[in-house]
Amino acid sequence: MAEIEIREINDLERSALEFLEHIGDASVIAFYGAMGAGKTTFITALCKVLGVKDVVNSPTFTIVNEYLSGTGRAIYHFDFYRINKLSEVMDIGFDEYIYSDGLCLIEWPEKIEELLPEDTLRVYMTVEGDDLRILNF
């Protein structure tokens, strides 16, 4: 298991680069953490270092946002916080996203745990004080 410390908001880009060095060819990444832990903020930093030019924000109401990396790879950012039934996830074509060539970044994966592929990279984000976040994966 790997661990990355994010010491402050200015440390996000370095942390995102370090994270990308560790993930290998993982294409489905599930981010676990309490409300306010910084999942969306970290995913925004990941998208930035991957070369996304669009504004990255939480897809809380749209469920999924789609971006293109600097290399043209699709990035799908999911937020399942408001999901109440697995059928809602299937209705958006979730299988098509996770079995595509794109990178899937998932917030609130505990809501859809049984739909995640076996090889999903699970990332646990914890808050340690005001300016420290820890990623374990």
Image (cartoon, rainbow, N blue to C red):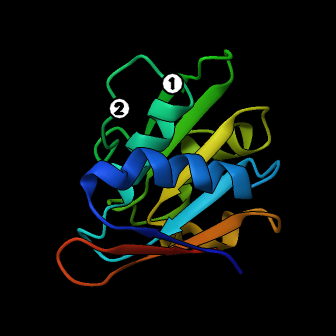
Residue 65: % across, % down: 44, 33
Disc 1 marks which residue?
67
Q: Quadrant of the C terminus?
A: bottom right
Dot 2 lies on which element? loop
Q: Is residue 105 above or below residue 66?
A: below
Query: Mark 1, residues whose alpha carbon is within 10 Å: few (<14), some, or many (≥20)?
Result: many
Q: Is residue 61 above or below residue 40?
A: above
Q: Quadrant of the N terminus?
A: bottom right
Q: Please name the residue shown 55% across and 57% down the image.
A: 87
Query: Mark 2, residues whose alpha carbon is within 10 Å: few (<14), some, or many (≥20)?
Result: some
The image quarter containing residue 94 is top right
Judged left or right of residue 75, residue 127 is left
Amino acid type at circle 1 is Tyr
Residue 126: % across, % down: 39, 80
Residue 25: % across, % down: 82, 48
- Residue 56 image label: 2
Judged left or right of residue 54, residue 20 is right
Q: Please name the residue shown 57% across and 46% down the image.
A: 17
Amino acid type at circle 2 is Val
Dot 1 lies on which element? strand
Q: Is residue 57 above or below residue 118?
A: above
